[in-house]
Amino acid sequence: MKLFFITPILFSALFVSAQKKNLPNGEWRAVLERSDGNNIVFNFQTKDSAGKKILYIKNADERLLVDEIKNTGDSIIIKLPFFEAQLHVVLQSNNDLSGFYYKRLVDNYQVMPMHAYYQQNFRFPVSQKKTNTNVTGRWAVVFWNDDAKDSTFDVGEFVQEGNLVTGTFLDPTGDFRYLQGVVDGDLLKLSAFDGTMHICSRQKSITIK
């Protein structure tokens, strides 16, 4: 009789544990932690569609569908449809996610810690909600490498509404498309993410002069 009562309790506990691994539906703010501190920030939305879990990576007006999501052990594996990249995450008790971003290279993987915060739909926090700066329009932009020995020249096109900014950078090889961010005081913060690591060049913090 003791086994009769213990077994359902164990089954119930395992069932609840399994349920916790499923992604809840809603909005998320994700951060990929670069070793140089220039983190990659993006947003995504999870939902159910045709009996399966899907998510959309959000960059301004762009929505990138991700429909390969599965539970493996205590992890949730999200296979991005670009560049052989994946997210391996664990659902925390507060519904946040912690894990790693993996991108397959020629003979190894590029790995980066990742955290995603549930029900946060903003891109960057703003310390100064009121701003007298408006970056709407076209700008000549100069980017310097960290050692300041090399620079590139692009054209920035932005639309600003309040603190929120969308836009792109144009260069001879094309444009960055669907950048999203904020103006915070005299600082412009922009980012985008589509699954590949060269996207880190699209996250810019620029002092407006």
Image: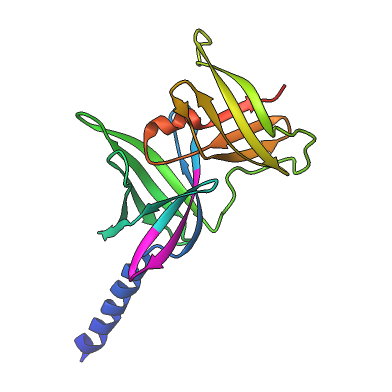
Residue 161: image x %, image y %?
Answer: 70, 44
Rendered image quadrant of residue 135: top right
Number of on-image labels: 0
- Image quadrant containing the C terminus: top right
Rendered image quadrant of residue 181: top right
* Residue farthest bottom in this picture: 1
Q: Is residue 37 visible?
A: no
For residue 49: magenta? yes
The residue at 72%/30% (across/down) is 186
Q: In the rendered image of this protein, does residue 184 appear above or below residue 209? A: below
The residue at 76%/33% (across/down) is 133
Q: In the rendered image of this protein, does residue 91 appear above or below residue 123? A: below
Residue 153: image x %, image y %?
Answer: 54, 16
Residue 158: image x %, image y %?
Answer: 63, 34
Q: What stretch is highlighted in magenta?
A: 42-54
Task: Report the front residue among 92 and 22.
Answer: 22
Q: In the rendered image of this protein, does residue 75 appear above or below residue 168? A: below
Task: Report the front residue among 105 and 14.
Answer: 105
For residue 85: magenta? no
Task: Report the front residue among 52 and 94.
Answer: 52
Instruction: Identify the colour scheme used.
Output: rainbow
Residue 182: image x %, image y %?
Answer: 64, 39
The residue at 42%/58% (across/down) is 92
* Residue farthest top in this picture: 149
Direction from residue 34 to residue 209 in the image, left or right: right
- Image quadrant containing the N terminus: bottom left
Main secondary structure found in the magenta portion: strand
Direction from residue 203 to residue 113 in the image, left or right: left
The residue at 33%/71% (across/down) is 51
Q: Can residue 207 be seen in this view?
A: yes
Task: Report the front residue among 80 and 10.
Answer: 80
